[in-house]
Amino acid sequence: MYNKSVMKGIATWWWLYGALPALLMGLVFQSPAPPQPPARVRPVDFAREVLPIFKASCFPCHGPTKRNGGLRLSNREDAFKGGVSGPVIIPGNAEASVLVKRISGEELGPRMPKGMTALAPEQIETIKRWINEGAPWPDGAENAKHWAFIKPVRPPIPEVQNKRWVRNPIDAFILHRLEQEGLQPSPEAPKEVLIRRVYLDLIGLPPSPEEVDAFLKDKRPDAYERLVDKLLASPHYGERQARIWLDLARYADTDGYEKDLRRSIWRYRDWVIDAFNRDMPFDQFTIEQIAGDLLPNPTLEQRIATGFHRNTMQNLEGGVDQAEAHFMKLVDRVDTTATVWLGITFGCTRCHDHKYDPFTQKDYYAMLAFFNNSKIYPVGDASVGEEKWLEAQIRAPTPEQQRQLAALEKRIERLKKLYPTPPEWHTLIPIEATAAHGSELKSLPDGSMLATGNTPDQEVYSLQLRLPPGRYLALRIEAIPDERLPQKGSGRAGSGNFILTGVSAMLEGQPLAFRRALVDFTQDGFNPTALLQRDSPDQGWAIYPRVAESHELLLLFDKPLRLRREAILKLTLRCESQRWKQHVLGRFRISATGSNALQWREAEEDKRLFEAQIPTTLVMEDNAQNGVLKAQIRIRGEFTNPGEEVEAGTPAVLHPFPPDYPRNRLGLAKWLVSRENPLTARVQVNRMWEAIFGRGLVETSDNFGTQGTYPTHPELLDWLAVEFMERGWRMKAIYRLIVTSATYRQSSRMTPELLQRDPKNTLYARGPRHRLEAELIRDNALAIGGLLSRKIGGPSVFPYQPEGVWDIPYNADRWVMSEGEDRYRRGIYTFWRRSAPYPSFVAFDANSREVCTANRPRTNTPLQALVLLNDPVYIEAAQGLAKRMLKASRGSIEKGIQYGFRCCTARYPQPPELARLRTLYDRMREHYRAHPDAARKLTGQDDPALAAWTMVAHVMLNLDETITKE
């Protein structure tokens, strides 16, 4: 186990051998690539490549509404005419064109665009190329509809020269572009690299050396395809894909804002995992998340799915205008819907018409109207500004809990048939009743007792009851409301409540044991079982807020009583809460029964207790719809500045809202996944491509508008979008198509030519290579160390995190570390607090999930190295890997090192790598022989060899290759 005292020693030895990873990474070189023919440059497409730059950076001053300096670039005639200083575009001569000089800062005067971000070098180069090609400006290009807002049509698969390389249509599109650019694809990656790559992409976990060996030995021609199918069928596939989706869904376990209180919504997270594993069609996946509750006779799972839009933050701060706070939820739902399914920056139109895309402020509030019908449950006192607006929350049993619940209900039904008559209770009249602290007990005609006189802070009632001959199974204590008591309740506290903290009984001088306490109702936070214990003075039975109702407590004897003659029962009732003063029982009645019908009452209590353990989850729930849903435009986006009212609708520029669709969230969801929608399929396949290759065919995956980047392979994007829809929106089919392509299977090695020609791999002349996401880095370390729990689903867990992280947020909640396997669950199950996300995830670019995030940045910082070096998770993983290597070594140090290296990278170490690691092992072993205390602190054992293995494992886990998908 991890011990803080080892860190200084580990850090020292790390710096002694810190150059090792760099040395290891530089040992394998690729032979120089053969000379390639000169690149054939593809002509610039004005409408798709130049015009968007003009719209974004030039139109504000030189567009349809402004003509600064007499220059207008929004139509061909004006653009070539120029401004007051003459023509700015000289077709065929970029160097002489004033436009180029001004945007590149080569001419005196302010660099254009004035007051805005300068154009990127590649944008300037695009404009130069366009001008040098003669500045072609097709008729009507400025009025052409943006490519992304046109319904995709399946393009023909292009012809290529190297047909043997093509494995599926993806390759034809990629190779066609490569051949245009004068490039050749890279060789196929080694099988060890390929299996690790596809494991990480499809299930997010590394293959074991045994799994690698099995793949290497499989000589069937479709061995790789069989491997892909196995991974797609793995339950861990859903966990891998859900990691990406939960960023989009802004899933978290807390409300956000300053209070950032806990919420229960993990059943939604598990629904997402299950949906991916079942390969739920994306159109159904969409409909159930946006409007599952509006489907005919929705199932529990369909209601749970609507948690997608309950993931929005909840502002429960004091003094907050709840109407405005609810409006901000609606804003978040509109913005998230537009980002996730349409890939547009729709949030701009909350305040004004979009500056660049054809969306209006009216479009925004028309979409908001779809969400403007949520059922609100006010909680708290509005008169003092403490009312909170909550939305629907339901019990959401897991499938296993549903099975157990059904079994309990069958048991109750069977017992009720067996004992159809309710228990018959015999009232026991006290022959003596006293109160220890000043109350007076008065006997009433119905056999009940009423406490009168002064109300003490605590009270103990002692009763002597005559018990006739017979068989007895239980006592009953009834709490009876009375008009003479506060709030007409059954307790003497000002609220009408009481707290019964203990009950004991004696029969003929012998103590009676109770095996169970059953109640028909108990106050939240109070457990009647505590009545049977003497060490819980502030626990027991309480009934607030249902104080004006009759309630009962049943005490089941440990063994049945069989009395042949009358006996005296002495019963003691304690109301001795130390915290809640005067919470004393006011009116009560005692009775007894020997009926076997108690069995079904006990079964009902089993069911009640079981139902109390069932998790709740947040869901969408609408008011009954009367007429068309509407929303008010908020001028400048300000809630306090309402404007005209608009009806629910969608941006017509994309495709009309069908008249037969309902004008509610269900209609919106169907509109999003209509075959007529030009964006949804494109956005989703682009996101899937990005998940595999690290960047989308459209790099700006959250912006398919005119300000977003143009697709690197537009025909491939459209082909995939149409293929996606025609394959029934099945995501596994598209992932399989991508990962079985020759494009994906290329080596990721960078040649000098590719570094110069295509450093970002936008042409895909090599395979994908990028660092793993935060959760996957941790998952891999745990898997490599043999520690990972592969349990699927369940409540969020609390693995190790540094002390004090949760001291920063406002509330007093604290992180209590999980025990057992829950400490080693996958990162997707880690409790996500918005105001203080899990620190090691944040170090590797995870977000707070306060809002929808379409893609994470990928940074390189010293903090990341420190996390891998010092985080106890990685220390424990190193300890686990060391034990695996020691077991695999079988007396051979080299074999152990090879096994550990393969656990981390899937490949065997090269001879120089093996030699360096062997040297490290020998030096570490000698060090720990000389310092046995250090070995004991590191491993818990006086074993210098195990300590040396641990340090070697620690180095391996810190290799760049270990945390990178090659």
Image (cartoon, helix red, strand yellow):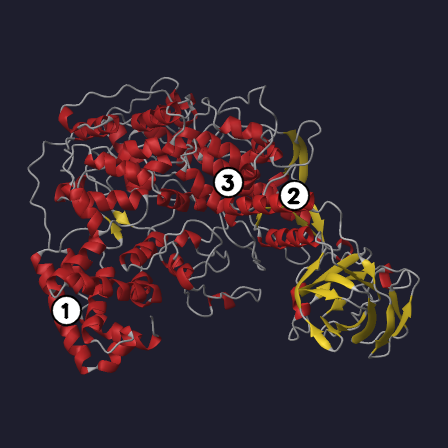
Q: Is residue 573 above or below residue 375?
A: below
* For marks 2 and 1 on the same chain, the one whose residue lies earlier in the sequence: 2
Q: Quadrant of residue 121?
A: top left
Image position of 323 with respect to 438: above or below: above
- The image shows residue 816 at horizontal and vertical percentages of 49, 66
SS at badge 2? helix
In this rendering, the label closer to the viewer, 2 or 1? 2
Specify few, some or many for label 2: CA neighbours under 10 Å numbering under 14, 14-19, or 20 or more.
Answer: some
Q: Position of residue 489 (x, y in %)?
A: 84, 60
Q: Are marks 3 and 2 in contact (CB under 8 Å)?
A: no
Q: Residue at x 34, y 64 (%)?
A: 873
Image location (x, y in percent) of residue 842: 40, 57
Residues 172 and 554: in front is: 554
* Cα–Cα span, label 1 and label 3: 51 Å
Q: Is 451 or 606 nearer to us in this picture?
A: 606
In the rendered structure, which disc, 1 or 3, sits on the residue that comes first in sequence? 3
Residue 952 appears in the figure: yes
The residue at 33%/52% (across/down) is 776
Q: Is residue 771 left or right of residue 643?
A: left
Q: What amino acid is labelled 2 in the image?
A: Glu
Residue type marked 3 = Thr
| SS class, disc 3 | helix
Q: Position of residue 34 (x, y in %)?
A: 6, 38
Residue 336's disc is 3
Q: CA distance from mark 2 to mark 1?
A: 69 Å
In this rendered view, identify the residue nearer to me: 358 or 794: 794
Q: Amino acid at mark 1?
A: Leu
Q: Which residue is mark 2?
A: 413
* Badge 1: residue crowd in 10 Å (few <14, some 14–19, many ≥20): some
Question: Circle 1 sits on which residue?
Answer: 920
Q: Is residue 340 left or right of residue 500?
A: left
Q: Local crowd at mark 3 within 10 Å, few (<14), some, or many (≥20)?
A: many
